[in-house]
Amino acid sequence: MGEHRPDGENFGATQNGGKGVRIRVSRWRGSFAAGWAVIFAGLHFFWALGGEVGLDVSSGERLANERPAWFVAGGLWGVGLLCLIGAVVALGLRRRGVRGRRWHLLRLLGLAICVLLLFRGVLIEALLVLGVPAVGEVSAAQKFWTLAVWNPWFILGGVLFGLAVRSFSRGMVDRVGADTVATP
């Protein structure tokens, strides 16, 4: 019933009158990365519009209470907008048939997002676990939520973007290989 390719790109297959239906994991990876980015954008827009839940343990009590204009504009609206741009990149990583400069640009942007998210998540996690003095005070609640939720969330996003880039790159290599094979 199921079909398995060595490259792991097919999730499964079922027979329907002799026709196989395959779920392409490569397409889902881009969708999951886009979903991650949209959820994170939504959270930032919620905070930018005045929502309070979780903001104090994310950014600190002072910023959450005072909400200076630079923080709302850049840290909330700006990050939300960047997340939506990341979602567009992730959806682009789902596409097939992209070639040349657009392929390189999408791959580079996806890889940059992956590295940025992983770097941020792992670095802050390590600094907090090691007890390195931070700029300003970090409350016990903020430290807990950062270690338990925020940093793993950044790491998850980095992994999702990395998998989407990997599938996108592999898809292009598979197509190039298929294009160069002579047919009888």
Image: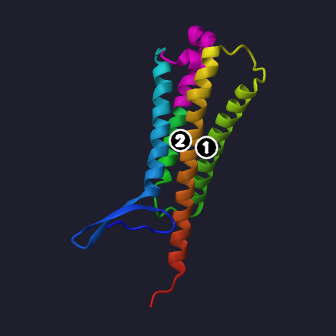
Q: Quadrant of residue 74?
A: top right
* Label disc, if present, on residue 76 of the rendered structure: none
Residue 129 coordinates in the image, percent (x, y): 71, 28
Q: For this rendering, which residue is in front, 183 or 135?
A: 135
Q: Is residue 1 magenta?
A: no
Residue 14 coordinates in the image, percent (x, y): 30, 64
Q: For this rendering, which residue is in front, 148 or 44?
A: 148
Looking at the rendered structure, the kind of residue marked 1 is Ile
Answer with left or right where residue 35 lies relative to residue 148: left
The residue at the point 65 percent across, 44 percent down is 115
Q: Is residue 57 magenta?
A: yes
State the residue position of label 2. 86
Q: Residues within 10 Å of mark 2 (few under 14, many from 20)?
A: many
Looking at the rendered structure, the kind of residue marked 2 is Gly
Residue 150 coordinates in the image, percent (x, y): 58, 29
State which region is magenta. 53-80
Q: Residue furthest bottom?
A: 184
Report if the CB atoms under discs 2 and 1 are less than 8 Å apart: yes
Q: Residue furthest left?
A: 17
Q: CA distance from mark 2 to mark 1?
A: 7 Å
Q: Quadrant of residue 177?
A: bottom right
Q: For this rendering, which residue is in front, 98 or 170?
A: 170
Residue 143 coordinates in the image, percent (x, y): 64, 20
The residue at the point 61 percent across, 25 percent down is 146
The residue at the point 50 percent across, 38 percent down is 37
| Rendered view: 176 above or below 21 | below
* Label disc, if present, on residue 113 of the rendered structure: 1
